[in-house]
Image (cartoon, rainbow, N blue to C red):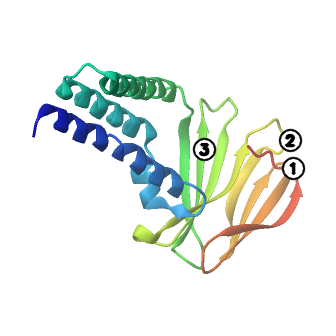
Amino acid sequence: MNRVRIGGVLAATALLPPAVGAVGRLESRSGGRAVVADALNRPVLLVGAAGVLLLAARLIRGRRDTVGGVVTAVGVLGLLFAVGASVLGSFQELVRSDTRTSSPGRTDHVLTVVNRGYSEQESNTFHIALETGTGLSARRWHVLTVQQAFPGQGEFVSAQWSDAGHVRITTDAGYRVFTVDPDSGEPTLTESAGKVRTV
């Protein structure tokens, strides 16, 4: 196999990381498979890998033509995106706490609350989700994202199971109750009162 063909194979292989990332992104939506989302939803890493493969393809191919120029340009853009996104990611809010509470009636229904923020004094964001099922079939459902606010304006207080099939999210000015479908595990808003400052 000559260098042009090897370069072509590498360039074609560079399409694989974005395709894998697309699957991970799709599964990261509410109700997606948690294991697949955690493993494959890594856009920075996958775009960087595609960029490296394209640049390697260009170097191995060795030809100076339009195809090589396009491959080089796309590879450089992919690497620049990956480096830029990594730098920006270092400024993201830190995970201040991560709690997991099983339903009193079902151990395969787990309520998660992730608190992200820069410090205890600054406004934090609470990401509330529900994980249902086990193993490869486990799914993650988005319940609510609550922004910490000024007192009396819907500041997050708690998220907990009110019973085996209901999740109650309370703020200092209101609450939301979600009913969890016993079969699919999907949470549905069934009761609401007062203020909840969502993102």
Disc number at residue 115? 3
Picture residue at 36% right of the left edge, 32% below the top: 48
Specify few, some or many for label 3: CA neighbours under 10 Å numbering under 14, 14-19, or 20 or more.
many
Residue at the (24%, 38%) spot, across then down: 8
Viewer-closest of 193 and 38: 38
Q: Residue furthest front?
A: 65
Is 132 left, or right, of 38 in this rendering?
A: right
- 36 up-or-down from 134: above or below: above
Q: Quadrant of the C terminus?
A: top right
Mark 1 element type: loop
The residue under label 2 is which amino acid type? Answer: Gln
Q: Quadrant of residue 59?
A: top left
Where residue 180 sits: x, y (%)? 67, 73
Q: CA distance from mark 1 to mark 3?
A: 19 Å
Tell me the quarter of the image containing the N terminus: top left
Q: Are marks 1 and 2 in contact (CB under 8 Å)?
A: yes
- 182 displayed left or right of 37: right
**Number of residues whose C-alpha sits closer than 10 Å to that of mark 1, classed few (under 14), some (14–19) or many (20 or more):** some
Residue type of the residue flagged with mark 3? Asn
Residue at image mark 2:
153
Residue denoted by label 1: 195
Q: Secondary structure at mark 3?
A: strand
Does 27 appear above or below 79?
below
Query: Label 2: few (<14), some or many (≥20) within 10 Å?
Result: some
The mark that comes first in sequence, 3 or 2, is 3
- Rounded to the nearest angstrom, the CA distance separating label 1 from label 2 is 7 Å
Q: Residue at x 39, y 22 (%)?
A: 73
Residue furthest right in the image = 194
Q: Earlier in the sequence, mark 1 or mark 2?
A: 2
Name the residue nearer the viewer: 74 or 86.
74
